[in-house]
Image (spheres, helix red, strand yellow):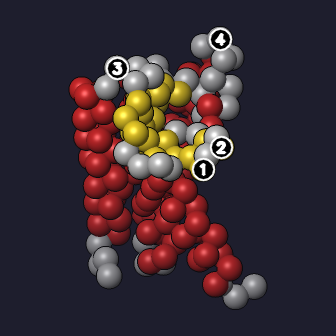
Amino acid sequence: MLKNRYAWFGISAIIVVLDLYTKHLVQQAFDHGERLTATSFFELVRFHNEGAAFSFLADAGGWQKWFFTAISGVAVIVITYLIIKYHEQKLFCFGLALVLGGAIGNLYDRVTLGYVVDFLYFHINDWYWPAFNVADSAICVGVAVLLWDGFKRPA
């Protein structure tokens, strides 16, 4: 699939570009908190997440921005090292590349805006899934790929 150890970073770059572009479009089209109902189960929104996944610690008073920025920065360094070291393990590196792209996309928001822009909002009746974005999607799929890879390997 990919012969060059650095080609995995191309996948990450695609995720970052898609993430930042879609967030830019949402920021241009919506005011904070604005919603557009697309279907009976999906809305486009513009929410600002100052916390981590599912708004964890969003109301913590501001210190969480630097905490999550530091964690993301360390994750980017560790994932980069793992991709370079294990570049021949295709499924493993594919999962890592997705997580890396998502981490960088959300890290960029956190550093430049102080929050992460979320805009995909699914619900069933009155039960709402937390809003998310392309970066969050890439991270979730990447983690699923990493788990699948881990279960496929012999013990």
- The quarter holding residue 7 reads bottom left
Q: Earlier in the sequence, mark 4 or mark 2?
A: 4
In the rendered image, residue 88, in percent from the top left (x then y), is placed at: 43, 78
Write down the residue under mark 1: 124
User: Which residue, given by chain and number where applicable, does mark 3 sit on?
Assistant: 31
Task: Answer few, some or many: residues within 10 Å of disc 1's Cα (few below 14, many 20 plus, some between 14 and 19).
Answer: few
Residue, x 59% and y 77% (percent of image)?
149
Where is residue 108 drawn, in percent x and y? 38, 32
In this rendering, which labeled residue sits more in front, label 1 or label 4? 1
Q: Amino acid at mark 3?
A: Asp
Question: With 13 as the anchor, is 66 left or right in this view?
Answer: right
Which quadrant holds the C terminus? bottom right
Q: Is residue 76 visible?
A: no
Check disc 2: other Cα within 10 Å, few if <14, some if 14-19, many if 20+.
few
Looking at the image, tell me whether mark 4 or mark 3 is earlier in sequence order: 3
The CA span between labels 2 and 1 is 5 Å
Q: Please, what secondary structure does the residue beneath circle 3 have? A: loop
Q: State which tag comes first along the sequence, 1 or 3.
A: 3
User: Disc 4 versus disc 2: distance between alpha carbons?
Assistant: 27 Å
Q: Label 4 near label 1: C-beta < 8 Å?
A: no
Q: Nearer the viewer, residue 86 or 55?
A: 55
Secondary structure under badge 1? strand
* Precedes in sequence: disc 3 or disc 2: 3
The answer for how far apart the CA atoms under marks 1 and 3 are is 24 Å
Which residue is under mark 2? 127
Q: Amino acid at mark 2?
A: Trp
